[in-house]
Image: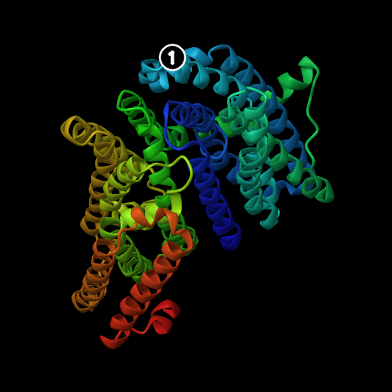
Amino acid sequence: MSIFTLASRVTGLVRELLMASMFGASALTDAFNVAFRIPNLFRRLFAEGAFSQAFVPVLAASRAQHGDEATKEVIDSVATALAWSVLALSILGVLVSPWLVWAMASGLQQDARGYDAAVNMTRWMFPYIAFMSMVALSAGILNTWKRFAVPAATPVLLNVSVIGATWWLAPWFAQRGIEAIYALPVGVMAGGVLQLVLQTPALARLGLLPRLGVRPSAVKKAWTNPATLNILRLMGPALLGVGVAQISLLINTQIASHLAPGSVSWLTYADRLMEFPTAILGVALGVVLMPQLAAAKAKGDDDRYAAMLDWGLRLVLLLALPCAAALLVFSQPLVSVLYHYGAFTDRDVQQTTLALTGYGVGLLGLVAIKVLAPGYYASQDIRTPVRIAVVVLVLTQVFNMMLVPFLAHAGLALSIGLGALVNALWLLWGLLRKGVYKPQPGWWRFAFQVLLATALLTALLWFAAHHLNWVAMRQEAWSRIGWMALVLMSAGLLYFGVLWATGIRLKSFLKR
């Protein structure tokens, strides 16, 4: 799963690099990013988010208590109810696309061409949610039966499909007088279809391919199935938790759409780079810790519970702090090497760098949340992290009002970063106040060792960022890539070398 997650992030980055080179940052790229966020918003709310959180526990409980045959009936009922729901939602979404675009990014009306493109692309891509909802259902089934590889691999197909559409279909459209940007929604829809197609044989081999009810009586039976009703009941609080982050995204997109054309795209390109450390460090740590924390809590082993949290937080500091430092002082070289080709201009580099620096301020908080929140979930306390997230959402908008007038789109990124730090500190304070987390001995020495190594790494990266003209090296692409590889390898060797010299042994630390 880790390998496929990394593959998804790498192909996603390649997708963004190709899009940046082909289309740059403009009103039309803003239109695509807004149009793509609309079905993604609903997908994260109803498919991969709240639905998955509710469906998987119900499915696992049914299999454990009633066996595979009864669980197959649950699958058929839930699949029928979900399929008809997302079909109706897709039709409705296509019809109300102009209002959805206005609600998400009314500022696109500054450019009529961009606004019309956003509406058209939303209509093309909205049915994507139907495919992804069924993909989420299939993934839940396969994971319950411990078939992890196929669900983990499917996200790669979306990126590959969009890459193919950008590389081959966009020029073909341009030659025929069609806006090349319209190749992207075709790629997105093809990616949704491919993901579902990939999972179908895996379900069929297990004999778990859902049978969808078509007759009104079958649909009614599906909706009244106790398992379906239980999933709907569980989706309520899950929707609230997932919805907070999506509301924040919606508000930020709305604000960005009223700023200079390209603002939505600059934030999107920067966010793609942020996904590497947040996903590979934060998500991985959260996935590893959650079952172990829950097991320790269930056994009443408070010492092990606190020790696991302590181990996770030390890893956060060890791995996320140098990443955050790199984003603060080395953003421009990273953006230049990764994005600065084709239609991506010097100004785009500058503006994306500002956004990435703003995100970097909160990287440590964003990763720490993935460790701290499971500390509450393992105790079956979902309300506290949700309450904190709601308050932080309000606080983030206060930061927006203070920062956006002066920093424009970079203010939006900085507000998210500051909000993440507040969220993480609040979660940490709550665990300390309850006494469930007790820091283990040696924190001061450990923190000094990591800070010393990070300070030296930061100095090296700052020197490299200011003594090489990364933007001017655009015409020497391979030379620029070579310098980047040399600097990053040197920084890595320096950081881990200093840790080793001061007494930190990573092998024993990671075995702990």
Q: Where residue 333 sits: x, y (%)?
A: 34, 57
Q: Position of residue 5 (x, y in %)?
A: 56, 56
Render colour scheme: rainbow
Q: Report the quarter where the C terminus lies.
A: bottom left
Q: Is residue 160 left or right of residue 327?
A: right
Asked if 487 appears above or below 370 in the picture, the reply is: below
How far across and down, in percent of the image, does residue 159 sit?
60, 45
Residue 65 visible at all: yes
Q: Of residues 360 and 108, which is closer to you in this image? A: 108
Instruction: Judge by depth and name the residue closer to the eye, 343 or 83.
Output: 343
Residue drawn at (37%, 39%), measured in percent from left and top? 267
23 or 502: nearer the viewer: 23
The quarter in which the N terminus is drawn is: bottom right
Q: Quadrant of residue 87?
A: top right
Residue in the picture at 68% in, 57% down: 149
Q: Residue at point 30% right, 63% down?
A: 468
Which residue was labeled with disc 1? Answer: 112
Is 421 located above or below residue 90 in the figure? below
From the viewer's perspective, is 211 left or right of 320? right
The picture places residue 499, in percent across and down from the top left corner, at 30, 81
Q: Is residue 322 above or below residue 443?
A: above
Is residue 368 at all visible to an observer of this figure?
Answer: no
Amino acid tagged 1: Ala
Mark 1 residue crowding within 10 angstroms, few (<14) / some (14–19) / many (20+)? few
**How many numbered dots are placed on residues in this image?**
1
Q: Identify the element where label 1 is drawn.
A: helix
Quarter occupied by residue 414:
top left
Judge by depth and name the residue closer to the eye, 194 or 267: 267
Relative horizontal placement of residue 31, taking residue 311 as reference (left or right) = right
